[in-house]
Amino acid sequence: MKFENFKMPDYDHFEKELLQLLKENEEHIEALLENPEKEYRSFVRPYMETFERLDLFFTPLSHLNSVENSDKTQKAYESSLPHLSRYHTKLSQNVDLYRAFSKITGEDRAQNEVVRLELRDFKLSGVDLPKEKKGRLEEIDLRLSELSNRFSQNLLDATNAYELIIENPKDVEGIPPNDLAMAEMERDGKKVWRFTLQIPSYMAYMTYGPNRNIREELYRAYVTRAPQNQEVIDEILRLRDEKAKILGFDHFSELSLATKMAPDDDAVIDFLNELSKDALPHGEKEAQKLRKLARKDGIEKIESYDVAFYSEKLKKMELDFDDEMTRPYFEQGRVLQGLLDFVEELFGVDFKEVKVPVWNEKVRVFDLRKSKNSFARIYFDLEARKSKRGGAWMNDWQTYHEDDKDREHPASAFVVCNFPPSSDKTPSLLRHDDVVTLFHEMGHAIHHLFSKVKERFVSGIHGVEWDVVEFPSQFLENFSYARPVLERFARHIETDEPMPSELFEKIEKSRNFLAAMGMLRQIEFALFDFMLHQKLYQGEEIQALLDSLRERLSLIKPPSYNRFQWGFAHIFAGGYAAGYYSYKWAEVLSADAFFACFGKEKEEIKKDMAKGYLHHILEKGASAPMRELYHEWLGRDPDPMALLHLYGLAGRKISL
């Protein structure tokens, strides 16, 4: 198997090279259609190979536009979007392709699933619509891709444009030394501290910053970023609504669910509302504790910009714990090695670090091997920098599959985070939250990299229903709270002493600290997203919808100037439109699967169950719907009560 080496694009000629590749792909597909003998192996496999070639060429640019953003990446990326949109629309509306797939039968379950999903997607692309409506769909898809990119770029530009300079040392008292060192700088011959809207910097002040006025100033800047995105949002929603109606759906949420596990709108809304009913009584008790603590400081009405600060204080009081206590034990390199060691032991693979071309000197690359034979490759880009968009994600590049000549092709993926940068003087020390994030993204990565499915369209993360794509990431994330796992790498940066027992216990207890408020926040986002796509909302109607949900679910109401939607990149610049509920839906599967592999009472990993999870879930990709794969593993459907048990909120029975 041959791995692609990462290489920087030729920005000056990228558009020309892309157009040439698209032309070659189109010619190849036309030649396939002209062949009267269309069988799966001779038609579908070479057709899928055109998608792999395109991903190998274009993914590096889209990746660089997120991790090394510059005028050059933006220009090349934006100029590519219209060509890609037209290309994919033309394919998805090609009647000859649709007819060819409708006559093909696969030789096994995975091949038949490829055919089923392709026929479904052709219909969802309007393949059987009149020419005029097809043309309008093409215009909509092109415009939506442009708007999504503009939303993301507006957000990144607004984040990078802001800084807050603090001159008074009293205003940074209590902020952890690591965060202070990152913020410290000299301006006009004077020591000052610079805070930005980059998450590590922003959260440092919101969590520990003693000056309430500064916290509000930072918070206001963060929740009002990119006001120009309001116009972008309005147009995105109009186009999504129009697209859904052209395709015969009443609204966009119905179109979204056509490719998901959830059966209909009511199932999603009922699921979220039932969860909220269980969480609300617990959440009110949690909010009362924060209010009481704030009143001790003379604050009669606690605000959103106080929540992180008083949550941290409350955690220290109740658990004698704050995330800074764990930082000396979680040096980034050691955490990564510990994670790799754990995955090795759990799933019977090994990781070998390799020196190959990368886009930044901080990037580390590993080959995944079995019996010393490499079958996949993973790139880790873990540290924050100005040219990188915020957040954390996994991006797939190569996909494991067999081509029409039965040659195997390996998988590769990028794991990206925004951890505190390391330097010659300062190591990158992680909060436990950062450790959780790394485990989460690794869960996505191994879902893609461990695939043994030979058909590209259903291998790895390809073809997986969107509302269960978070299942493997959340499953692995759960182990980041398990003491037997943390013991592998939690050692003090200076003394090399292992983390003390009481600190492990505090980390475990911290999982459910303010868990109900956290769950209600996610439910609020999920209901806002889903209801926003059940009819057409515009302008102030969007804020009114969000406000109505906050009345019911926000126990500490955000200030009226909060414009969360301007930064809601998951649904306006990502793939989660009418799908943000997926995080909670998938969490039911991940909690149930975790308890199957890691007992509720004894803290020990059940290796036989983990082996079954590898075989039935990770290695099977989307070769069958997830409900089927899950049932084949455990012999039953997922148990929704597992989610409530995980967070200590068990109450009434709920269902998927």
Image: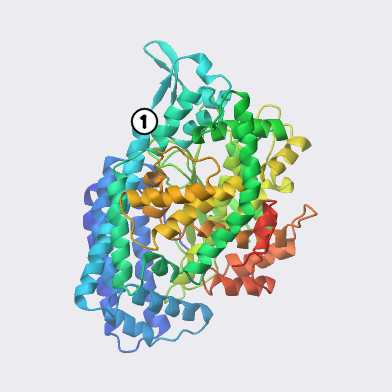
Q: Is residue 266 left or right of residue 601?
A: left
295 to 61, vertically: above or below: above
Picture mark count: 1
Relative depth, front residue between 388 and 196: 196
Q: In which quarter of the image is the C terminus?
A: bottom right
Q: Which residue is drawn at 40% across and 63% down?
A: 534
Q: Residue at x 40, y 40 (%)?
A: 388
91 to 590, vertically: above or below: below
* Residue 251 appears in view: yes
* Residue 422 appears in view: no
Relative depth, front residue between 86 and 303: 303
318 to 580, vertically: above or below: above
Residue 21 at what x, y percent from top left? 27, 63
Residue 248 at what x, y percent from top left? 33, 75
Relative depth, front residue between 193 and 77: 193
Q: Is residue 259 left or right of residue 490?
A: left
Circle 1 SS class? loop
Q: Which colour scheme is used?
A: rainbow
Residue 224 at what x, y percent from top left? 37, 38
Question: Label 1: few (<14), some or many (≥20) within 10 Å?
Answer: some
Direction left: furthest residue: 132
Q: In which quarter of the image is residue 502?
A: top right
Residue 159 at what x, y percent from top left? 37, 36
- The amino acid type, in three-letter code, at marker 1 is Tyr
Q: Residue at x 44, y 79 (%)?
A: 116
Q: In this view, does 142 lie to the left or right of 209?
A: left
Q: In which quarter of the image is residue 153?
A: top left
